[in-house]
Amino acid sequence: MILQRTLKQAISATGVGLHSGERVRLTLVPAEPNSGISFYRSDLPEPVTIKVDPLLVNDTRLSSTLVTATGVRVGTIEHLMSAFAGLGIDNLVVEVTAAEVPIMDGSSAPFIYLLQTAGIVEQTVPKKFIRIKQPIVVVEDDKWVRLDPHNGFKITLSIEFDHPAFNLAPQKVEIDFANHSYIDELSRARTFGFMHEVESMRHHGLGLGGNLENAVVIDDEFVLNPDGLRFPDEFVRHKILDAVGDLYVVGHPIIGAFSGHKSGHALNNELLRKLLITPDAWEYVSFSDPQDAPSSFHRIPVEV
């Protein structure tokens, strides 16, 4: 049986928010089976718990941000959610002391390290997957995303930037998790931004915590980070890392193929919302025999 997962013990880290610039302490706390992923704003006079839900992703300006009906926010959740998906974490409480998850180094690798350090345990309840039965498509001008039936999990994404730094490597990548490791292929890919956008971002209260330690920064011609890129195609790999996290907001691993062109947080979330209102397009499944599950989900490491 493929079982749900949580952590052996709580673990904490401290960092700054990419957009707020605020210092924040993050604590990952084990949770009961079937409880899912929740964020807990412990810094508020009356602390608030926000269960991850596609319908609560109500701000997608340069990140995925949960916003409740009363305006309580937890921002930049996508890299952390991507790490949870990469290691198959089903149930966890994420306690934060500010309105944003710390950016760490701009990738999901520090979160992978935290999760593996805390230790991952299987629980006694079957993991629930969402299996795609019919295509779901969202198109906006020249941008599009889609989910298709596929006996596994794979992502194919392309980006389009007419810029010297991007033209050095392919701007389209496919990652089939039946053959590729999330940790090796995606986790170290960092978020990126352009110098010419910084002034506008900061005018809108965004990017206040960004620097060369937590993002790839590009001027009119070059990557400004002294050590360069971690992958020749790091930009599109980071977009795939983001997509993994954005999709995991649905609360369960997806058995299907995700593809897109020039996609971002807004389109990814719109796709999930369309999926949820199309009940004939998907179903919940569990596997009493692990060998019946797609091989994409056999590669995820676990410590018991």
Image: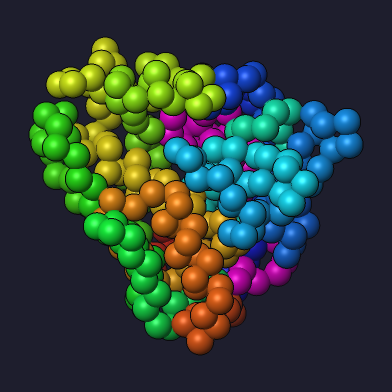
**Residue 29: x percent and y percent?**
74, 42
Q: Residue at x 27, y 38 (%)?
A: 235
Q: Please state which of residues 142 and 298 is positioned toward the viewer in this rendering.
A: 142
Q: Which stretch did the figure color magenta?
A: 102-128
Q: Please state which of residues 91 and 216 is positioned toward the viewer in this rendering.
A: 216
Q: In this view, does 22 lie above or below 259?
A: above
Q: Residue at x 38, y 21 (%)?
A: 198
Residue 17 quadrant? top right
Number of callouts:
0
> In the rendered image, is residue 293 in sight?
no
Quadrant of the snapshot with the N terminus:
bottom right
Q: Which residue is drawn at 56% across and 56% down?
A: 249
Q: Residue furthest bottom?
A: 280
**Residue 12: x percent and y percent?**
68, 29
240 falls in the magenta region: no
Q: How is the image coloured?
A: rainbow
Q: Please state which of residues 36 and 223 is positioned toward the viewer in this rendering.
A: 223
**Residue 123: x percent and y percent?**
70, 61
111 falls in the magenta region: yes
**Residue 298: x percent and y percent?**
44, 64
Q: Residue furthest right?
A: 46
- Say whether residue 163 is left or right of residue 199: left
- Say whether residue 250 is left or right of residue 139: right
Q: Residue furthest top?
A: 226
> In the rendered image, is residue 198 in sight?
yes
Q: Is residue 11 above or below residue 38?
A: above
Q: Please state which of residues 238 and 280 is positioned toward the viewer in this rendering.
A: 280
- Say whether residue 87 is left or right of residue 163: right
Q: Which residue is drawn at 73% across and 64% down?
A: 34
